Image (cartoon, coloured by chain):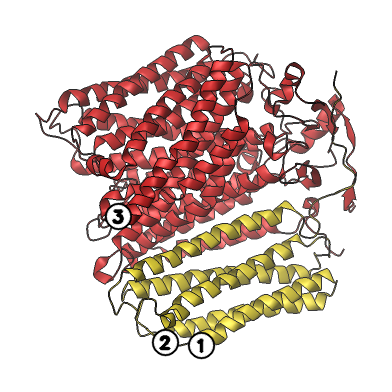
Chain colours: A red, B yellow
């Protein structure tokens, strides 16, 4: 029977019969079938998180091997080439395969729950972005494991990356792998943007979005337009290497600096893309443990966006030492200094939240609060290098290494581990051990600072980065030994985190829906949430629907128990972009094999390109086309169109 | 105790009606990302050209004999695709088929002419940075045209199978939007490679 084009959604209360109906529609099939076809954002989110933590562990082991090599002068644990591949693979792993995907994982899992929706806007696209991420990760690591890892740093400057200096497959693996991975980032970004704008609970107007949504939305908008820059750069590099083009080759009239421009036009916004969502985690998590709403919500939300807008105009600060004209240097230096203003807004808002609140010390709070300190240290060293003459002195030294680790570990790893303590009970129904958590936090915090605080001095004393060893008697020996010891302490801390998660998974599920007495919608559903998230679509009237009774700042209260039932199929509600007024009933897609098929085809394409096996590449392209056709084929149940109507 | 707010919407569209659906937003994000890609390709051209030595432009006066009519052909195909979309809207299936089929054929014609344009060049992909930029940028565009032709063919076939109605036609509108984008972006590529040399860039 052909369903109607328009319907007035029935309003009702939650009931067991209603839940059973929804479960039948929303549950993923068991076993392998469900594994490869699921489009449930919670399953995809957990896969993202597990895979990204796996890459964190791999990248961490690579770092430890390097720290062994650098523990003393003139050590020969690694050859220069091995060291090159290790530091490049470490950077690639941490920046591309851990830092961004881990945030995508948390956002994937949490967004529909935070937004009061039943899934992401494009569930199959969501599955695709995970499969491509996994395939690209394997592709990149296949290079490393066959001795063909990237060996020119994650930034991959020409001319060292060009074929004359780098004849092996190393750079081809890296180039094609990055183009491949870019597809995942791009479709993921598109999905986040449309999800944030169109699938929210009625009443969740744009000024009531959790800050984490602001962070990921901003990051996604940026990724959508900057990832093509790096994908293009890598593709052009691959063509220079394999097809004799001259994009970056001065001998043929090309511009080596074009690589750096394209790379950093992407690279700097990307830095914000991997910290803004994590700052959002702090903005949403910290206030829960301070028992009050975030201070300065509007200022924090707007400064998130402002940071990114300024972030588009600072890429040249990675290129101060390349001989660009003075005017360009002045402009980009000014922009880089200006960006401290919106960053400071978040810091002061967090401090004010702690100051005005009644903090309850938990492991999550410790991680969130320590982010503030590490962010300030990393921010100040960044502010220093924003000044051109200081940068000329410090560039290519360990000072910059210390800076970027304070930023990336301080504002990504620390908040992410805090977020894990905060939200894993929601995902599994099981708490993490607080006692072990304290050990976990202090080991990580002490180890991290022990490793990276002295590194600033190492850099000030002139030790160059990216070199496999150093001579004795330069004054760097003790500092490097301390850094190496600190890095192992830090690694033990991370290990304690994994142990804590493992222990928690073996414990009894007794977290309950809202173990932290937190204010937002994800805590209104059971832990773990049912496949359909919300039995009835909630209506919200504030930023903290579960705290309304005690805050009493709005006239009305949010409706959690009663709302649209939407049980005529796999349905959720679509809302308007700004005011979140119900706009349409969205018919969500069933589980599908098309995404995994598309990812397999794309993987075959990239392997074919790498080996110049054109038949394989052609077959992969055919498979991609087939998967897209299956994906988009008119289907009655999707209500996209109706044959013969 | 304050009152509970509850959204009780009147009649809502179920699934996409017309262009009103999140799929259209999805294609919008795709177009934004692709537009950025072409912006970077053109940035590469202007960046390299601005710093190049005299003589970098291999064709200081690019021949327009094929390129200009071909540009007009591609832009006209956008109009024809729009006529096809109107056909779906007005329940005139023959008009829709003619529109989508016609646009696909015109797109194919553009690809063929572009192929001759390439063949006529005295330089190849590896001659110089100018040649690499020219072939890769136009090649990127051709690849998009070919994908667009595939989309038009799919819409043509689904129209022939009578899948669309004036209300249920998001796929048509989204596909035609993509085709408009492919045509529009060519104007920028054309202006960069065929017009700016006459205005003095790179000479």
Q: Are marks 3 and 2 on the same chain?
A: no
- Residue A369 as seen in the image, left or right of residue A71: right
CA separation, marks 2 and 1?
10 Å
CA separation, marks 3 and 2?
43 Å
Front position among marks 3 and 2: 3
Which residue is nearer to you in this view: A390 or A105?
A390
Residue linked to disc 1: B66
Which label belongs to residue A326? Answer: 3
Which residue is nearer to you in this view: A616 or A337?
A337
Mark 2: which secondary structure?
A: loop
Label 1 near label 2: C-beta < 8 Å? Answer: yes
| Residue B58 on image: x %, y % | 34, 81
When asked about the image quadrant of residue A86, the answer is top left
| Residue A257 on image: x %, y % | 31, 59
Residue at horizontal 45 percent and vertical 56 percent from the top = A229
Q: Is residue A391 above or below residue A481?
A: below
Residue linked to disc 2: B120
Q: Is residue B28 above or below residue A580?
A: below
């Amino acid at each position: 029977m052909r369903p109607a084009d328009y319907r007035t959604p029935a309003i009702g209360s939650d009931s067991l019969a209603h839940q059973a109906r929804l479960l039948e529609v929303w549950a993923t099939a068991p076993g392998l079938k469900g594994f490869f076809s699921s489009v449930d954002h919670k399953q995809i989110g957990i896969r993202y998180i597990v895979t990204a933590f796996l890459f964190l562990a791999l990248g961490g082991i690579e770092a430890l091997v390097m720290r062994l090599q650098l523990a003393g002068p003139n050590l020969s644990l690694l050859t220069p080439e091995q060291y090159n591949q290790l530091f490049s693979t470490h950077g690639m792993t941490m920046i591309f395969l851990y830092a961004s995907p881990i945030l995508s994982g948390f956002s994937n899992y949490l967004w529909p729950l935070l937004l009061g929706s039943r899934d992401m806007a494009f569930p199959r696209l969501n599955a695709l972005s995970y499969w491509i991420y996994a395939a690209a990760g394997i592709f990149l690591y296949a290079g490393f494991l066959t001795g063909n890892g990237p060996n020119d740093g994650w930034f991959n400057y020409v001319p060292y990356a060009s074929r004359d200096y780098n004849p092996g497959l190393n750079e081809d693996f890296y180039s094609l792998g990055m183009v491949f991975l870019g597809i995942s980032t791009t479709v993921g970004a598109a999905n986040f943007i449309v999800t944030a704008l169109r699938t929210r609970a009625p009443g969740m107007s744009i000024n009531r979005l959790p800050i984490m949504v602001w962070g990921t939305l901003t990051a996604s908008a940026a990724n959508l337009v900057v990832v093509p820059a790096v994908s293009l750069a890598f593709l052009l590099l691959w063509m220079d290497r394999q097809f004799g083009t001259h994009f970056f080759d001065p001998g043929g009239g090309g511009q080596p600096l074009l690589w750096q421009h394209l790379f950093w036009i992407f690279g700097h916004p990307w830095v914000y893309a991997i910290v803004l969502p994590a700052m959002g985690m702090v903005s949403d998590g910290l206030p829960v443990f301070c028992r009050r709403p975030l201070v300065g919500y509007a200022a924090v939300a707007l400064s998130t966006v402002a940071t990114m807008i300024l972030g588009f105009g600072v890429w040249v600060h990675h290129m101060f030492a390349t001989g660009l004209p003075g005017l360009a240097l002045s402009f980009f230096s000014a922009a880089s200094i200006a960006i401290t203003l919106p960053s400071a807004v978040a810091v002061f808002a967090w401090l004010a939240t702690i100051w005005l609140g009644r903090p309850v010390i938990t492991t999550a709070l410790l991680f969130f609060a320590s982010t503030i300190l590490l962010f300030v240290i990393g921010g100040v060293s960044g502010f220093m290098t924003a000044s051109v003459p200081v940068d000329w002195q410090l560039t290519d030294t360990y000072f910059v290494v210390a800076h970027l680790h304070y930023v990336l570990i301080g504002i990504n790893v620390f908040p992410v581990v805090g977020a894990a303590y905060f939200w894993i009970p929601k995902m599994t129904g099981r708490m993490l051990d607080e006692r072990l958590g304290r050990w976990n936090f202090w080991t990580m915090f002490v180890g991290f600072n022990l490793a990276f605080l002295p590194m600033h001095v190492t850099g000030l004393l002139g030790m160059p980065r990216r070199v496999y060893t150093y001579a004795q008697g330069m004054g760097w020996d003790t500092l490097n030994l301390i850094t190496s010891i600190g890095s192992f302490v830090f690694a033990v801390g991370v290990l304690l985190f994994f142990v804590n998660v493992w222990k928690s998974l073996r414990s009894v599920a007794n977290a309950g829906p809202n173990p932290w007495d937190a204010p937002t919608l994800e805590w209104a559903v059971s832990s773990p949430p049912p496949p359909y998230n919300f039995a009835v679509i909630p209506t919200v009237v504030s930023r903290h629907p579960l705290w309304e009774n005690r805050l009493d700042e709005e006239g009305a209260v949010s409706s959690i128990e009663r709302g649209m039932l939407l049980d005529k199929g796999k349905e959720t509600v679509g809302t308007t972009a700004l005011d979140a007024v119900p706009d349409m009933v969205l018919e969500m897609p069933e589980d599908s094999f098309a995404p995994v098929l598309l990812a397999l085809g794309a993987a075959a394409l990239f392997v074919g390109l790498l080996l110049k096996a054109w038949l394989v590449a052609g077959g992969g392209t055919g498979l991609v086309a087939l998967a897209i056709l299956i994906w988009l084929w008119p289907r009655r149940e999707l209500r996209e169109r109706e044959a013969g109507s | 105790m304050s009152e509970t707010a509850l959204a009780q919407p009147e009649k809502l569209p179920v699934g996409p009606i017309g262009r009103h659906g999140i799929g259209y937003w999805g294609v919008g994000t795709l177009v934004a990302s692709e537009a950025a890609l072409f912006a970077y390709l053109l940035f590469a051209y202007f960046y390299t050209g601005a710093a190049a030595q005299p003589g970098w432009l291999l064709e200081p006066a690019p021949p327009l004999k094929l390129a200009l009519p071909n540009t007009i052909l591609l832009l006209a195909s956008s109009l024809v695709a729009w006529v096809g979309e109107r056909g779906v809207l007005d329940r005139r299936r023959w008009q829709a088929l003619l529109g989508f089929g016609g646009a696909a054929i015109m797109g194919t014609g553009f690809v063929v002419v572009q192929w001759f344009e390439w063949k006529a060049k005295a330089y190849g992909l590896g001659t110089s940075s100018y040649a690499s930029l020219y072939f890769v940028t136009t090649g990127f565009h051709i690849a998009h045209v070919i994908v667009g032709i595939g989309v038009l063919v799919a819409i043509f076939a689904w129209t022939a199978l009578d899948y669309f109605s004036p209300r249920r036609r998001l796929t048509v509108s989204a596909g035609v939007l993509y085709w408009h984008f492919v045509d529009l972006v060519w104007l920028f590529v054309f202006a960069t490679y065929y017009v700016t040399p006459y205005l003095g860039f790179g000479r």
